[in-house]
Amino acid sequence: MYDINKIREDFPILSREVYGKPLVYLDNAATTQKPLCVLDAMRDEYLNVNANVHRGVHYLSQQATDLHEAAREKVRQFINAKKIEEIVFTRGTTEAINLVASSFCESQMKAGDEVLVTEMEHHSNIVSWQLQAQRLGIVVKHLPITDDGRLVGCNDITAYITPRTKLISIAHVSNVLGTINPVEDIIKIAHEHGIPVLVDGAQSAPHMKIDVQAMDCDFFAFSGHKMYGPTGIGVLYGKEEWLEKLPPYQGGGEMIDKVTWEKTTFERLPFKFEAGTPDYVATHGLAKAIDYMTSVGFDFIEAHEKELTRYCMEQLQTIDGMHIYGPVVNGSPVDNKDAVVSFNVGDIHHLDMGTLLDRLGIAVRTGHHCAQPLMDRLGISGTVRASFALYNTKEEIDALVAGIRRVSQMF
Ligand SMILES: Cc1ncc(COP(=O)(O)O)c(C=O)c1O
């Protein structure tokens, strides 16, 4: 059973106070809190195991390597990848996308070729491609969205595909709108045109069961810190056939086979893409976070977070001047809406709302959420964003709603 009080005990930070008020942490799309099992495992590794991985013959190094590689296998199972060779550890989603942008554009694209993203992307899935556009003369195009924050109908997507489209890169879930994009449909259409697809899973991996084989994406990127794991660790999944084709992203230790002044050959997958000492303690922490989520269960996580989203939207709409962004039908979240609710109230500036909510102990995010082109599309400078995790409660949403009412009355 989903015993929320028991779950909250696993996250001691949730019982702290700020400004003398109980903390209400609703900034989970930015980063989640970490359960004790993750913190304990990482502390234990530093205390009892710590040694650099892969290179050592000694006991500690081998033990650290075993933990690190066990984490890779854990990630493989978590997203149902075929092989561990397809799991590349990165610093996070941003680095994973930059890796593909750099290696794919350089090896597979020519000036004038196109990458197609969407109008609701996080900057990491825009600027990474723009940097390559500056370097190589490729073109970054975007799929438009509807006023209520959905992608244009899937069939229309073909209208944006040209013979020069070489890659499609899309968010699985929008970090602002909560829209769950129909990635399977898009991937099917893309593959009919021979185009690979990268899915930015930063906002989906924490909330739903991911199966990269069923999805059939070519690349999938996500961050550990948004799913109860440590900061500084993330994952790039890539189909083996693609990773084999791409050149290394960075040079250094760990990623080579043989180095001479004349020629360097590279390690096998996935090490070819992992230059330098990896954050092997963080990979172990990530494995523990996956264990934690699995033990709670995705059925429970999904049902609980959907109910929180529904309840939040229902309650927010009782407030005068409330404007919620993203897919809504008759005031309720639709099925393609995840644990993120972005809103503004009347003409109260989002920053004022966030700052005053903070004084009441309520942590929300304000601003453009690293999605300025989306803000331009919506004709706003920013929103207030409440985002949920498996440990949030309806009482916390009541506190948010009461807080917004109080702030609204001050204006
Ligand atoms: C949809 C999306 N993509 C990418 C990122 C970047 O993630 P990170 O900063 O962990 O690399 C975020 C972070 O908020 C995100 O929400």
Image (cartoon, rainbow, N blue to C red):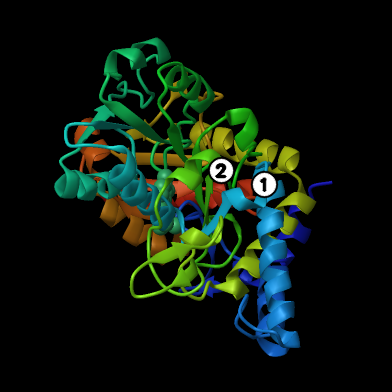
Q: Mark 2 points at which residue?
A: 240
Separation of residues labelled 1 and 2 (CA atoms): 8 Å
Label 2 secondary element: helix
Picture disc at residue 340: none
Where 33 falls versus 276 (above or below)? above
Q: In this view, does 301 lie above or below 162?
A: below
Residue nearest the viewer, comparing 329 with 269: 269
Q: In this view, does 56 lie to the left or right of 299?
A: left
Which amino acid lies under the numbered mark 2 shown in the image of this protein?
A: Glu
80 relative position to 169: left or right: right
Q: Which residue is drawn at 34% across and 60% down?
A: 356
Using the image as rendered, state which of residue 307 and residue 237 is in the foreground: 237
Q: Position of residue 160 (x, y in %)?
A: 28, 18
Q: What residue type is labelled 1?
A: Lys
Mark identifier at residue 83: 1
Residue 136 position in % (x across, y down): 18, 45
**CB under 8 Å between callouts 1 and 2?**
yes
